[in-house]
Image (cartoon, rainbow, N blue to C red):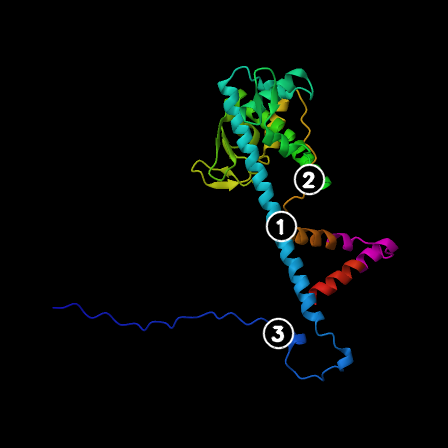
Amino acid sequence: MGRPAKAVTKAKPAIINVAKPAKADPAESTALVPMPNSKALSLDVGMKALNMLSAVVTAEAQIHQLTESNASQRGKAQVLVAMAIHKAALADPSIRLEHCMMKDKTPEKIKLGKQVRLAIGLMVSDGKKVMLTPEAHAAQNAMPGDDADTIKRKKSVRSNFSTMLTKSMRVALHVIETKTKASIDKTGFLKIEGPAVKKIFGDTSVILNEDENQLKDKKGAIVGKLSKLPSFTEITRAVGDAHGVKVVARKDSRTQAVDPMAWLVQTADALVKALASLPDEIPAEVRKALDSLYNALDAKLV
């Protein structure tokens, strides 16, 4: 006896979600209005203004992208230098990294700086003296034909690299003294592993990419934030504590990568709270500032 045939159920028609068209701007409707007098026309202005504004918005987006890219490249350059110094110090006992904790211009720190520059290819020795390579000298110092802007930029490069070198030496020193494992992560940032890492950040394995969301469970899944921002700065503070030297983070005058939308949301929330606490009699300077804000919002949100 054959099995009874299965009941055939009708397939439900697929539900297709169709995006609603954007609400039309009343100012762009096709309803007929009288054409302005010919003397009232400036027909070239509209597209000029739109193109100029479009260029501004595009430039702002590019600046934001470049700022983020610059911060990433700076961090990765720092990693390359730190790992090269780490390699040099392990291979040559005469490279005394602990001298990087001394004050600037001490003979020991000056010697260390020259040794490190020799090790990473920025200096050469002729057996009698050491000097910057021609390329390194030209990248950091004024050369014939350089204009004022170029000289200013090179001065900034020299100052920033000096800071980078000291920070890299201190990170390499910490890694060696605490027997921490260090490697370059696939993203180009420094990965450090060991008990000393957990003592600082709350996890035994951390990537120094300034992303706190790295706290992992036993299976390696992200479950929360580290106790401190994973950065070279935190490592330099730790090595400073170990050597009894207070490390003060260098004030960074560079533009920071900020999400403008997130910043606006935070600022708007703070402003709403501040407005709620305003007195009935609003001071003139506050009223003037709020009027300016109101006009800007009115122009943007129409």
Q: Nearer the viewer, mark 1 or mark 2?
A: 2
> From mark 2 to mark 3, how far is it between C-alphas?
50 Å
Query: What is the three-letter code of the residue carrying label 1?
Result: His
Q: Nearer the viewer, mark 2 or mark 3?
A: 2
Q: In the rendered image, which quarter contains the N terminus? A: bottom left
Above or below, 57 relative to 217: below
Q: Which mark is residue 24?
A: 3
Q: Which mark is residue 212?
A: none
Q: Find numbered disc 2 in the image and state the secondary structure of the residue it sits on.
A: helix
If you read the primary sequence from the N terminus, does the residue marked by circle 3 or circle 1 appear first? Answer: 3
- Residue 222: x, y in percent? 49, 41
If you read the primary sequence from the N terminus, does the residue marked by circle 1 or circle 2 appear first? Answer: 1
Q: Residue at 67% of width from left, 53% of height from top?
A: 264
Q: Residue at 73% of width from left, 65% of height from top?
A: 299
- Residue 51: x, y in percent? 66, 64
Q: Find numbered disc 1 in the image and state the secondary structure of the residue it sits on.
A: helix
From the viewer's side, name the closer residue of 211 and 124: 124
Q: Find numbered disc 3 in the image and state the secondary structure of the residue it sits on.
A: loop
Instruction: List the residue tagged with mark 2.
Output: 150
Instruction: List the residue tagged with mark 1.
Output: 64
- Residue 291: x, y in percent? 81, 60
If you read the primary sequence from the N terminus, does the residue marked by circle 2 or circle 3 appear first? Answer: 3
- Residue 282 lies in quadrant: bottom right
> From mark 1 to mark 2, how far is it between C-alphas?
24 Å
Q: Residue at 79% of width from left, 53% of height from top?
A: 277
Which residue range is magenta in the image?
Answer: 273-291
- Residue 124 lies in quadrant: top right
> From mark 3 to mark 1, how far is it between C-alphas?
30 Å
